[in-house]
Image (cartoon, rainbow, N blue to C red):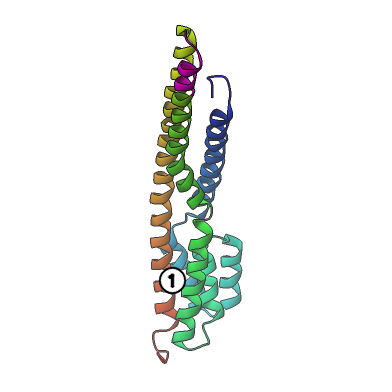
Amino acid sequence: MTLSGGPIFWILFAMAISSLVVFFERFSEVRRSQIDYQDFIKGVVNILASGGEDEALAICEDAAVPVANVVATAIRHRKGSATALREAVDSQGRAEAGRLERRLASLAIMGQIAPLIGLLGTIIGFIRSVLLVNSQEIVARADLISTSMEAFVAAALGLGVAIPIAVMYGILRVRMDRLIIELEAAATQIVSYLAPEKDPA
């Protein structure tokens, strides 16, 4: 690996670009999915109270966000038992949470292995230095400095990629956790409204 290229450099560079793509795609999706769930639930409940089930479903489908999808599932299963309703809502909630967290694991993995790849480059650089010393009676100072620098640059690049990825992962994790909490709260509210007197069995 050198400052201008080499396999370790390009692997880390590809990871940096990939992590940015994943971050901005997921960040955009999370922002799009955020709504005031309490106002949304109130609006849907008011419509349902006036007998507008089809209208409530249409509003949920138009919103097309996780909270709306969970509410729509609850409305579709409102005529079943309380257990069936809760199971349907829980299943949809898990599916929505899974979609929100899609590719988040890949970001975490890249953040974990970037320093290891940098360490690999460091070890390779030092091995090259040792081989250079052993293969020549007189080693040019520039050659020794060059191979040593490759080792240090690899370590720096590994950390330079890993640290921003860790920050990006943290930002997404906090936002997604908040969104999932709101999703669970919305599910609880709509189930409580639709099944207050249903048979629990």
Q: Is residue 178 left or right of residue 28?
A: left
Residue 52 shows in the view = no
Amino acid of disc 1:
Ala
Q: Position of residue 75 (x, y in %)?
A: 53, 77
Q: Position of residue 195 (x, y in %)?
A: 43, 84
Q: Residue at position x 48%, y 14% from top?
A: 146
Quadrant housing the N terminus: top right
Q: Please say if 13 is above or below 200.
A: above
Q: Please say if 134 is above or below 194.
A: above
Q: Position of residue 99 (x, y in %)?
A: 54, 59
Q: Is residue 131 magenta?
A: yes
Read off the magenta span: 128-138
Name the residue nearer the viewer: 19 or 83: 19
Q: Residue at position x 51%, y 17% from top?
A: 135
Q: Secondary structure at mark 1?
A: helix
Q: Residues within 10 Å of mark 1 (few under 14, many from 20)?
A: many
Name the residue nearer the viewer: 81 or 177: 177
User: Disc 1 designates what residue?
Assistant: 187
Q: Please say if 116 is above or below 185.
A: above
Q: Please say if 108 is above or below 84.
A: above
Q: Position of residue 129 (x, y in %)?
A: 46, 20
Q: Is residue 54 left or right of residue 45?
A: right
Q: Is residue 145 magenta?
A: no
Residue 155 shows in the view = yes
Quadrant housing the C terminus: bottom left
Q: Majority secondary structure of the magenta segment?
A: helix
How many numbered markers are drawn? Answer: 1
Name the residue nearer the viewer: 102 or 25: 102
Q: Residue at position x 48%, y 29% from top?
A: 124
